Image (cartoon, rainbow, N blue to C red):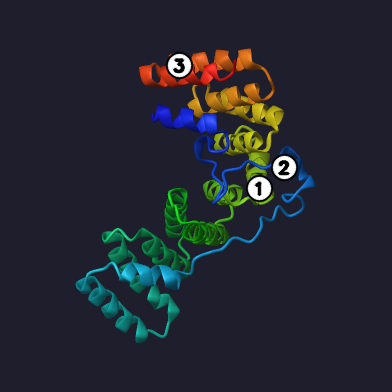
Amino acid sequence: MRTRHYLSIAIALILLAGIFVWGNTTPPKPEEAAGRGPMAGQGMAPPRKEASFDSILLATKKQMPQHVLAEIQAIDQKISTIQDSVQMAPRFQEYAKIWREHKQLPVAAFYYSLAAKLEKSEKNLNFAAQLFLDLARNEHNEEVQNWEVNGAIAAFQNSLSVNPENDTTRIGLAECYFGTGEAMKGVALIKEITKKDPEHVQANMLLGQQGLVSGQYEKAQQRFETVLKREPKNMEGMLGLAEAYKGQGQKEKAIALLETCKKTVNKPEFSKDVDNYIKTFK
């Protein structure tokens, strides 16, 4: 368990356990979250500048040794003779493998997603989507990050078209929407899950985290309490609930829960971080 990671995320609030905002780490105002501002209606975020695949590919090729470019060119020649698009999938897999071997993961993710779309493979679409999402979480270039998260969204959407019942895919897509500021789309997807399973851990965790982001602390509290009902020692749930208590001014409850976290984790560095954080409550 990366306890220092969990605590720093809890302190940051909007980054709790994977909630991220592409190019913007400012949480929305409560009135906006309540539907009176930019997130009202369809929950559309302002347009975001996005890098093009061609520009990413060109920049990547400039870093590659000549023998790698020769391998790529050989696949280009194979593709030029193919007339049936379905037969291109294995060639796109070849592209992806080469780029992945040389640690050029954004380009690899693009070709994995192309191949998976042609194959209509739920498994491979989810793999490509998750690769895009992981890259976006760690990307420092905002325009490339936007391109990566849009790649994740497209792959998750294609996966749901293959299997509309996959809740894990739905959660991944919702996380993308939360990150891009399209919170209402994300909430709608998650609530499809909680209608079927009101105590679904991941779904309630995401809704709880979104409650913290939007300042809806009572709703966040309810969600984290649901998580802990099913998983009493869920550390992210405990930290989230402590934040919900703090947000409502119930500092003693928050401190008591953080003390319980210290005992559960039982690691000196975690306890030290918790103690330092509690000092900020005073």
Residue 191 location in percent, x, y?
67, 43
Residues packed near mark 2 inside 10 Å, few (<14), some (14 to 19) or many (20 plus):
many
Disc assigned to residue 217: none
Residue 171 location in percent, x, y?
56, 46
Say what secondary structure mark 1 lies in. helix
Cα separation between marks 2 and 1: 8 Å
Q: Which of marks 2 and 3 is nearer the N terminus?
A: 2
Residue bearing the label numbered 2: 33
Decide: is 282 above or below 228.
Answer: above
Cα separation between marks 2 and 3: 32 Å
77 or 146, which lies in front? 146
Residue bearing the label numbered 1: 183
Residue 83 location in percent, x, y?
41, 85
Contact (Cβ within 8 Å) of mark 2 with mark 1: yes
**Residue at position x 32%, y 71% in the image:** 61
Mark 3 is on which residue type?
Lys
Q: Nearer the viewer, mark 2 or mark 1?
A: 2
Residues packed near mark 3 inside 10 Å, few (<14), some (14 to 19) or many (20 plus):
many
Report the number of numbered marks: 3
Q: Which quadrant of the figure has residue 215? A: top right
Quarter the C terminus occupies: top right
Residue bearing the label numbered 3: 262
Q: Can residue 189 be seen in this view?
A: yes
Residues packed near mark 1 inside 10 Å, few (<14), some (14 to 19) or many (20 plus):
many
Q: Earlier in the sequence, mark 3 or mark 1?
A: 1
219 or 117, which lies in front? 219
Residue 147 in the figure: left or right of residue 29:
left
Residue 148 location in percent, x, y?
48, 59
